[in-house]
Amino acid sequence: MSKKWSATTWFVVLGPLVIFLALTLWVASVLEKVPGWSFVPYIVVPMAVVFLIVGALFRYKWGKFIFG
């Protein structure tokens, strides 16, 4: 597998997850100021980080098998 293809698959897998994390952080910062929703960021931000880590592990472990 070429290095260009490898970098592309990393971008394809992790790009949307990084965007999801950024949107989650933005929404969490807005919801933190709303009464009754102040505990939501403590749940959704770790969940978004876990999705990012799982996506990176998925690409690292099975990337050559699936993409290669």
Image (cartoon, rainbow, N blue to C red):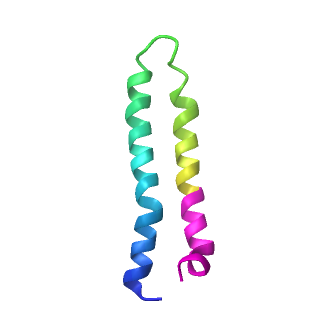
> Magenta stretch: residue 51 in it?
no
- In the image shown, does 61 or 12 lie closer to the viewer? 12
Q: Identify the image quadrant of residue 6.
A: bottom left
Q: Judge left or right: residue 63 versus residue 25.
A: right
Where residue 41 appears, as percent x and y from the top left, is: 51, 29
Identified at 45% across, 69% down, the residue is 10
Between 8 and 34, the one lying in front of the other is 8
Identify whether 21 is placed above or below 13: above
Query: In the depicted view, which residue is nearer to us: 20 or 43?
Result: 20
Is residue 19 left or right of 54 when viewed as pictured? left
Q: Is residue 59 magenta?
A: yes
6, above or below 43, in the image: below
* Magenta stretch, residue numbers: 54-68
Nearest the viewer among 43 and 5 is 5
Q: Residue lying farthest top?
A: 35
Please give the name of the residue rendered at 54% of the width and 83% of the height, measured from the top-left corner.
Answer: 68
User: At 41% from the left edge and 81% from the top edge, which residue is drawn?
Assistant: 5
Number of numbered tags placed on the structure image: 0
